[in-house]
Amino acid sequence: MIKEWKITLPELTGKEKRKAYVYVPDVAYAEPERRYPVLYMFDGHNLFRDSDASYGKSWGLLQYLTQHDVPLMVAAIECNHHAEEESCGGRLSEYAPFDFSDPGWGTIRGRGALTMDYYTRVFKPYIDKKYPTLPDREHTFIGGSSMGGLMTLFALAAYGDTFSRGAALSPSVDFSPGDVKEMIRSARWKDKVLYMDMGSEELSRRSRSIYGEVTSLLIRRGALVESRIIPGGFHSEASWERQIPFFLNTLFYALEE
């Protein structure tokens, strides 16, 4: 079952409202004493239903989790859609852990820390209070795609006291690879589990090299990484949907009940 409501992120967009979502397994209502791990995600509008998705195709998470009776809650927030304000307030800015320059968008002011502060200080406490969660770090995951994948790496690096495992699909590690590598080098990774992938059809020679370097660096730093190149994979919700069983397997692997 999907619950949705409107929230504000005052530090990012003032009083402007956006949607928050939480998926709760149907069995939770029949077994009220049971508690569940929570996967926090970005781009919440693209996850569950095609009717909400920016490009008319979602990840299909609602259908998958329901059909397979996955004992997991998923909590997510809609992104900021104001692309015309990318330099200081759009999706790229909210999902950027650091400032960087892009040929198409110019200089992007990284406000990812404000986004993650909201997730950890406001959103997670609300979910833990209202829903049957396992609130401890071991059972708290983070995930996303593209810039949301980059934010997953940032969350594990800088907010590792909250999140123990993550799934970064098609992470935007090539926007500012030097900053990405420094972020990884400066963090503790030895007790963190990460699923990471990239579609073969979205990789240029440069991005393939950077993705390999990032994967190798994470392994050297001690992260438990499952890294995949998806044959025929694209930078799209349809492609990420097909990876759901793979990243869920990593998130749940050897997880203590």
Image (spheres, rainbow, N blue to C red):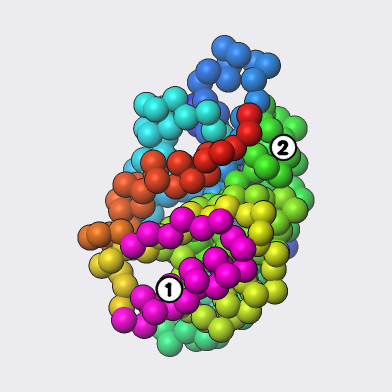
Quadrant hosting residue 85: bottom right
Q: Residue at x 46, y 65 (%)?
A: 171
Q: Is residue 61 above or below residue 156?
A: above
Instruction: Say which quarter of the image contains residue 235.
Output: bottom left
Q: Position of residue 26 (x, y in %)?
A: 51, 21
Question: Residue 174: x percent and y percent?
Answer: 45, 78
- The numbered mark at residue 212 is 1
First reached walking from the N terminus: tag 1 or tag 2: 2
**Magenta extent:** 205-229
Dot 2, crowdedness within 10 Å: few (<14), some or many (≥20)?
A: some
* Element at label 2: loop
9 vs 61: above or below: below
| Side of 205 relative to 14 (left or right) | left
Say the numbered circle drawn on residue 177: none
For image coordinates 65% across by 39% down, the residue present is 139
Residue 153 at x, y percent in the picture: 58, 63
Q: Amino acid at mark 1?
A: Gly
Say if 105 sits above or below 53 in the image: below
Q: Is residue 65 magenta?
A: no
Q: Name the residue tied to disc 2.
A: 135
Residue type at mark 2 is: Pro
**Residue farthest toward the top in the current orientation of the protein:** 30
- Judge whether residue 214 is colored magenta: yes
